[in-house]
Image (tube, grey):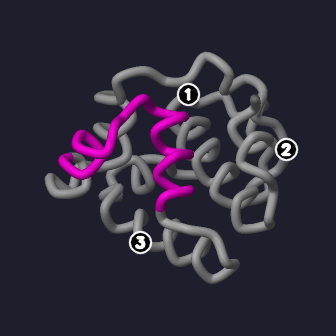
Amino acid sequence: MDNTRVFRMAFASVYPHYIAKAEKKGRTKEEVHAIIHWLTGYDERTLQQQIDKKVDFETFFAQAPRINPNVSRITGVICGYRVEEIEDKLMQQIRYLDKLVDELARGKAMDKILRK
């Protein structure tokens, strides 16, 4: 799989899909933001700056203030891959975000999504 294309995709181009997926299942934009904040350490202001700058995924995760130390507790399959077995660190971080948004859309409780 050629990860380069995914890494160069603008986070801002995928972000609306995360929101739409959650809202279609009765969840909120605020919950998606809580997931992003938990995973990356961005706050509302810095998240919006990244969206406005249209940074790619590589930059988005490279500039993340702090990847949550509990990410190793995120397990399961997303897009046919076990997230805990993905060797490329950046692809793993992208899939972590996909997995958390997927859990949200499936109706999982926020405390469980955020591994509390």
Query: Which of the two residues, 71 or 110, is positioned nearer the viewer here?
Result: 110
Extreme-right residue of the structure: 76
Q: Is residue 82 left or right of residue 93?
A: right
Mark 1 in CB contact with mark 3 (< 8 angstroms): no
Q: Is residue 77 left or right of residue 49?
A: right
Pair 1/2: label in front: 2
Measuring 63% from the left and 57% from the top, which residue is drawn there?
Answer: 101
Measuring 24% from the left and 40% from the top, which residue is drawn there?
Answer: 46
Extreme-top residue of the structure: 69
Q: Which residue is mark 3?
A: 16
Measuring 75% from the left and 32% from the top, which residue is drawn there?
Answer: 115
Crowding at dot 2, Cα within 10 Å, few <14 / some 14-19 / many 20+, comes out as few
Query: Which of the two residues, 51 or 55, is positioned nearer the viewer here?
Result: 51
Q: Vertical placement of 37 versus 98: above or below?
A: above
Which region is colored magenta? Answer: 30-49
Pair 2/3: label in front: 3
Q: Vertical placement of 96 versus 101: above or below?
A: above
Q: Which residue is mark 1?
A: 89
Crowding at dot 3, Cα within 10 Å, few <14 / some 14-19 / many 20+, comes out as few
Pair 1/3: label in front: 3
Mark 1 in CB contact with mark 2 (< 8 angstroms): no
Which amino acid, mark 2?
Gly
Which amino acid, mark 1?
Lys
Q: Position of residue 61 (x, y in %)?
A: 39, 34
Kindly report the distance in space between the C-alpha atoms of the residues bearing marks 1 and 3: 24 Å
Q: Position of residue 71 (x, y in %)?
A: 66, 27
Q: Vertical placement of 45 versus 32: above or below?
A: above
Q: Position of residue 100 (x, y in %)?
A: 67, 49
Q: Which residue is mark 2?
A: 76
Q: Position of residue 3 (x, y in %)?
A: 49, 48
Q: Is residue 47 left or right of residue 49?
A: right
Measuring 55% from the left and 68% from the top, which residue is drawn there?
Answer: 28
